[in-house]
Amino acid sequence: YPTLFVPASAVGNDLERAFVIRVRNNRAEWVDVKTGVASGNLIEVFGNLTEGEDVAVRGTDQIRPGAAVTPRISGSK
């Protein structure tokens, strides 16, 4: 898998794994990741993610897989 950096807060943990929450079609998907080096507020993750995909800024097990989520867009391009 390619190396990607996400906000450190995006990586959640439960008793079994580390994950990020990908938002696809306004639904939450848990994606298992392994973490690498930290750089400032970002952390390197390895998993089934592609650059440009939307991930929740806060990885939490309170957002269950399949839950409806509304992406929040910030900033401008």
Image: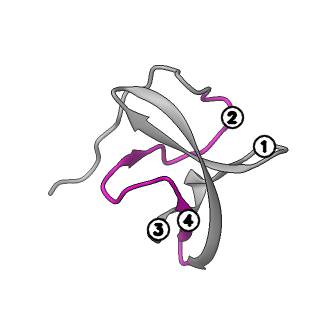
Which residue does the image show at 62% across and 74% down from the upper left? 36
- Look at label 3 and name its amino acid: Phe
Q: Is residue 60 magenta?
A: yes
Q: Is residue 4 above or below residue 69?
A: below
- The answer to whether marks 1 and 2 mark residues whose Cβ atoms lie closer than 8 Å is yes
Question: Colour scheme used in the picture?
Answer: one colour
Q: Tag 1's secondary structure?
A: loop
Nearer to us in this view, 77 or 27 = 27
Residue 65 in picture, x, y percent from top left: 58, 27
Q: Earlier in the sequence, mark 3 or mark 2?
A: 3
Q: Earlier in the sequence, mark 3 or mark 4?
A: 3
> What is the distance, in whole Å, between disc 3 and disc 4 at their CAs?
6 Å
> What is the distance, in whole Å, between disc 3 and disc 1 at their CAs?
20 Å
Q: Is 31 on the left or on the right of 52, as rendered? A: right
Mark 4 burial class by Cα count in 10 Å: few <14, some 14-19, many 20+: many
Which residue does the image show at 49% across and 48% down from the upper left? 57
Q: Earlier in the sequence, mark 3 or mark 1?
A: 3
Q: Which residue is mark 1?
A: 14
Q: Which residues are magenta?
A: 39-63
Q: Which residue is mark 4?
A: 45
Q: Tag 4's secondary structure?
A: strand
Q: Which residue is mark 2?
A: 61
